[in-house]
Image (spheres, helix red, strand yellow):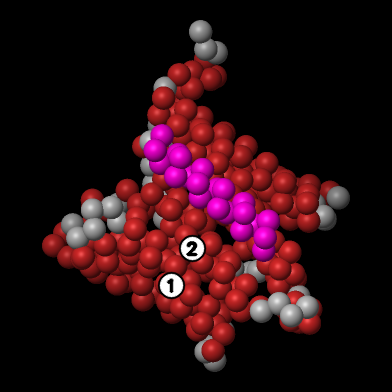
Amino acid sequence: MSLPLFEWTQFSFMRNALVAILIVTPLFAFMGCMIVNNQMAFFSDCIGHSALSGIAIGALIGIADPIWSMLVFSAALAIGVTLLRHYGSASGDSVIGIVMSFTVALGIVILSRGGGFNKYSRFLIGDILSITQTEIFCLIAVAIIFIVLWLVYFNRIFLVSINTSLARSRRISVWTIHGLFAVITALIVTISIQWVGILVINAMLILPASASRNMTKTTAGYLWLAAGINVMSGISGLAASYYMSTATGATIVLFAMAFYMMSLVIKKFR
């Protein structure tokens, strides 16, 4: 017999969603910390919204599951943005804004042709309650790959995010690291969009990291507190969405925002 507060755990789809949240939220937190450090919040938002063009390309060439075209498109987009930032004369924000405007418009135009956009609207809000056990195993594989890359490249990514001149003096290829991190971010964001939603995925990356940054001064504390905040927001949002019958991804973001506001209060009184 389950307690009323935890009655949502009796359903298999809710348990699957809980497992997925426990896998995804720490990944998002660690990535979010590096995104905030590298001032790439606009870039991750660009990748999320530009996924519409990846879906559109998949629909045009007849791919049954658009996730594959989304992955290829997001990786190519990440490399393209990195090259434009490196070799172009426009600022990084301008490049990202131009690319996002074009790709979002292109995706909407293609998908709305003939009034067929509604069947792709699930990608806008996501549905983590629909995740299957097979997809959970895929998430676990992604998490393992991410952890390996994180362990191998963390010091270089972190150094580049702090001081590019120092990184170059240590013979680190700054733009190679930028490109690698951009591709990793793009792939993980794209994989998660179908469950989290295009409209809210960037908030799940940025809010926990920003809240943690307000409350800690050490690198380890920054990373682990961000992970803790994201996990707590994920579990709380999942449970609340069950009782309120709301979109899970958006509900999680509301809890993450509450943690961020709390961090501002803590920072002020410190």
> Residue 184 versus residue 85: which sits nearer the camera?
184
Q: Position of residue 15 (x, y in %)?
A: 47, 28
Q: Which residue is mark 1?
A: 77
Q: Position of residue 120 (x, y in %)?
A: 27, 53
Mark 2: which secondary structure? helix
Residue 89 visible? The answer is yes
Question: Left or right of 210: which side holds 44?
Answer: left
The amino acid at mark 2 is Ala
Query: Within 10 angstroms of label 2, few (less than 14), some, or many (20 or more) residues?
Result: many
Report if residue 28 lies within the magenta region: no
Question: Left or right of 36: which side holds 91?
Answer: left
> Residue 134 versus residue 210: which sits nearer the camera?
134
Residue 248 visible? The answer is no
Asked if the residues shown at circle 2 and circle 1 are in contact, with their CB atoms under 8 angstroms apart, the answer is yes
Report if residue 142 lies within the magenta region: yes
Overall secondary structure of the magenta section: helix
* Residue located farthest toward the top when viewing the structure as drawn: 1
* Stretch of the chain drawn in magenta: 133-153
60 in relation to 249, above or below:
below
Dot 2 or dot 1: first in sequence order is 1
Who's the residue at 20% across and 65% down the image?
A: 60
86 in relation to 67, above or below:
below
Q: Position of residue 148 (x, y in %)?
A: 62, 54
Q: Which residue is mark 2?
A: 186
Residues at marks 2 and 1, CA–CA distance in whole angstroms: 8 Å
Q: Position of residue 171 (x, y in %)?
A: 74, 80
Query: Which mark, by number, is residue 205?
Result: none
The amino acid at mark 1 is Leu
